[in-house]
């Protein structure tokens, strides 16, 4: 089964994870990603030669879309364009809190763009960045595999 495209906000969540230093490369194809609250750890496997990926996050596991841990791993691999300035504007955000309290990804995206704007990054730059990453991610067509083990 091919993984579906994620909600747009997951690109920003992945960008923040990289900027926060929560993405650890364990091997050529394996990563560990720590949640924004630090209480969960996700295993990630990405093999672009075979077009395969998996992650133990809920979006990938239960909703079958490319979850933010996979996206953040692709940033680290240099396979998706990462913007360090935007990343810096997305550090130290409690993503789970925003997702659970706002219960709507579009509202979370607006809130995150407000935070980034307060840190000097215009919402228009964020929209352009998300569009660019989304376009590149769409070209990957990743197949969901079961090679991930809980970290």
Image (cartoon, rainbow, N blue to C red):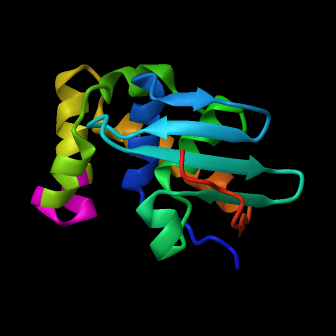
Q: Indicate the quadrant containing the N terminus: top left, top right, bottom left or bottom right.
A: bottom right
- Count of number-bearing discs: 0
Left-right relation of 24 to 53: left
Q: Position of residue 47 (x, y in %)?
A: 80, 50
Q: Residue furthest right?
A: 49
Q: Residue furthest front?
A: 150
Q: Is residue 139 above or below residue 113?
A: below
- Front residue of this view, candidates 57 and 110: 57
Dominant SS of magenta comes to helix
Residue at 46%, 57% in the rendered image: 57
Q: Residue furthest bottom?
A: 1
Residue at 69%, 74% in the rendered image: 2
Left-right relation of 71 to 18: right
> Is residue 86 on the magenta stretch?
no
Residue 80: which quarter of the image?
top right
Q: Position of residue 149 (x, y in %)?
A: 62, 54
Q: Position of residue 34 (x, y in %)?
A: 42, 36
* Residue 73 seen anywhere in this rendered image of the structure: yes
Q: Which residues are magenta?
A: 101-108
- Front residue of this view, candidates 34 and 80: 34
Q: Is residue 118 above or below residue 7?
A: above
Q: Position of residue 118 (x, y in %)?
A: 16, 25
Left-right relation of 129 to 107: right
Residue at 36%, 44% in the rendered image: 40
Q: Indicate the quadrant containing the C terminus: top left, top right, bottom left or bottom right.
A: top right
Residue at 16%, 59% in the rendered image: 100
- Front residue of this view, candidates 130 and 20: 20
Left-right relation of 116 to 66: left
* Residue 132 seen anywhere in this rendered image of the structure: no
């Amino acid at each position: 089964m091919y993984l579906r495209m994620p909600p747009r906000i997951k690109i920003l969540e992945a960008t923040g994870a990289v900027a926060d230093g929560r993405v650890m490369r364990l091997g050529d194809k394996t990563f560990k990603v720590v949640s924004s609250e630090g209480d969960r750890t996700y295993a990630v496997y990405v093999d672009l030669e075979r077009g395969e990926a998996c992650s133990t996050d809920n979006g990938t596991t239960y909703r079958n879309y490319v979850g933010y841990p996979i996206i953040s791993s692709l940033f680290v691999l240099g396979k998706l364009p990462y913007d360090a300035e935007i990343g810096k504007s997305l550090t130290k955000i409690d993503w789970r809190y925003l997702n659970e309290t706002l219960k709507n990804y579009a509202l979370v995206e607006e809130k995150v763009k407000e935070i980034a704007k307060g840190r000097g990054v215009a919402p228009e730059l964020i929209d352009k960045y998300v569009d660019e990453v989304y376009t590149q991610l769409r070209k990957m067509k990743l197949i969901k595999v079961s090679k991930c083990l809980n970290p």
